[in-house]
Image: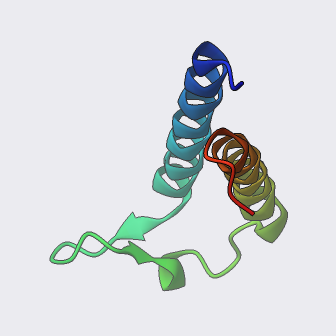
Amino acid sequence: MIDKKEVQIQADKLIELREQMYAYLDANLKKDAISGAYDFSSNPTLDAKGVYEHFFKLDYQARKIRNFLLTAYELD
């Protein structure tokens, strides 16, 4: 049986990591005034390692939650 409280904790962590990733992008990239999309050409020397670190944490947490859900719903 999956502990709902643990799932909530992990889901909250996913949202926190997502917010951290967007804060990093907001601090380092300009956004298009019309679409709001990040303009990666505005910082061609953006630290790839920094972007990867944020992405990796977010991806890891998403995969962790996926495992909780697969177990909870008895999926393969």
Residue 70 picture location, percent across and down: 68, 51
Q: Quadrant of the C terminus?
A: bottom right
Left or right of 48 on screen, residue 24: left
| x 70%, y 40%: residue | 68
Looking at the picture, does residue 30 appear above or below residue 4?
below
- Which residue occupies the foreground of this view, 67 or 33? 67
Looking at the picture, does residue 39 appear above or below residue 4?
below
| x 67%, y 18%: residue | 3
Left or right of 36 on screen, residue 60: right
Coloring scheme used: rainbow
Residue 1 picture location, percent across and down: 71, 24
Residue, far left: 34
Hey, which quadrant is residue 20 in on the image? top right
- Which residue occupies the foreground of this view, 42 or 63? 63
- Which residue occupies the foreground of this view, 46 or 4? 4
Left or right of 64 on screen, residue 31: left
Looking at the picture, does residue 5 appear above or below residue 71?
above
Residue 10 picture location, percent across and down: 65, 29
| x 72%, y 57%: residue | 59
Hey, which quadrant is residue 14 in on the image? top right
| x 71%, y 62%: residue | 51
Label total for image:
0
Residue, far top: 5
Looking at the picture, does residue 70 appear above or below residue 15?
below
